[in-house]
Every structure is written in structure tokens, then in C-alpha cells.
Image (cartoon, rainbow, N blue to C red):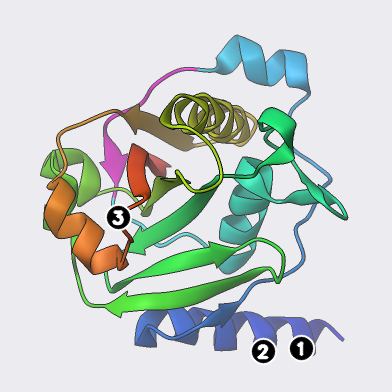
Amino acid sequence: MKATIILAGLILMSCFANAQDIKLNAPDKTGGKTVMEALSLRRTERTYVKKEMPVQMVSDLLWAANGFNRPTKRTAPTAMNKQETELYVMFDNGVYFYDAKENILKLVAKGDFRNTLGQQNISDNASLSIIMVGDLDKSSEKWAAVTSGYISQNIYLFASAHDNIGTVARGGGWKNEELKQILKLGDKQIITLIQAVGYLK
């Protein structure tokens, strides 16, 4: 059983390395610090040690950020449950759409696009950057921004609940039009927030 788990982990890490769709592990909803402890430790961190994040940690992080914790509802609230904000995840070898319902990372574009994120001192050393995208066909720009705030705080609390993990949310500085093309966004989709997550020195 243990060997099977290790083998599955190696296969998933190979998916990261080769940039293809990645079926994520089920999120581990145990462990970490208490909510009160996480709140007391919540802070912004901008300096990271370049290190790949294990697949299980990525799965747990994305579920905490905006996964489904009930059949039709998510860890981040939205007005009238519109669920207008979705997540894209950028690694150093590609960018993926987080399909929260299927718990899978779907490859959007293969390659290193971190230069489009700006602030390379942050983007290049983070394990990953989460790009929040609002769909204005589902709700307004205002509510997409509000939802992004909820998702961002979920990420902050996840980071502070785990030793040696840091995060910083950024409201600008990226190459908007170029990044929208890479993500293959439509006219009614807007980038609302980008949040780097990485290992601390």
C-alpha cells in the first residue's frame, strides 16, 4: 500500500515536470494549526526559497482556496452562489486551470510564462502563483473582486497554518493583455488578483 502511494506521487510529480493535465490527490482536511493559531500567524511574505511544492500540498492548497466543501458550494463564498471566480495556477513549466469540481489541473499553456506576472523577485522564486479570474457573465466586477478577497484570505490562512509556507497577494503589476492571451480568457473574463505561494528562507 505504501509503495503504491509513493508510486502515485512520483507519477504526479512527473506530470508537473512534463506539463500535462494533472489529476490531483483528494485534499487532506486534517492537520495544520487551529484557526486562531493561523490568524495569529497570518502575514505577508515576499521572499522565498525556490522549491517545488509536493502534489499533495498543491491539492490541499487549492481546495482550501476555492474547492468544493459541499456538493454545490465552495470554501470561498460568492454572492447568490454565482461562483464567478476561478483559479489558474502557474508553475515554472506551464499554466493550468483548476477544475475544482473534478479536482484536476487542466493544462492551458506549456512553457515558462512567469515574466508576465511582474515582480520577478517574487514570481521566479515562488513554488507557484495562483491567478484569480472573474467571469462577468456570471456576476459583476465588484463581486468578482470581493470573492477574490475571500479566496486570498483562505490562501493566507492555509499558508500560516503550515510551517515554512508564505504567500503574498498582488493587485497589479502583471502584463495584463499578454497574460490574458496565455490563459485564453474571453472578453468577459478579468484577472482580479495574483497570489504567490512558496517556501520561506
The N terminus lies in quadrant: bottom right
Label 2, secondary structure: give it.
helix
Mark nearer the N terminus (3 vs 2): 2
User: Which range is magenta?
Assistant: 43-49
Would you say 73 lies left or right of 181 here? Answer: right
Q: Position of residue 87 (x, y in %)?
A: 49, 53
The one of 7 and 107 positioned closer to us in this rendering: 107
The amino acid type of the residue labelled 3 equals Asp
Q: Position of residue 162 (x, y in %)?
A: 61, 36
| Contact between labelled residues 1 and 2, with CB atoms less than 8 Å apart | yes
Q: Residue at x 31, y 48 (%)?
A: 126
**Mark 3 crowdedness (10 Å alpha carbons): few <14, some 14-19, many ≥20:** few
Residue found at the very far front of the displayed protein: 137
Would you say 5 lies left or right of 86 here? Answer: right
Label 1, secondary structure: give it.
helix
Alpha-carbon distance for marks 3 and 2?
Answer: 42 Å
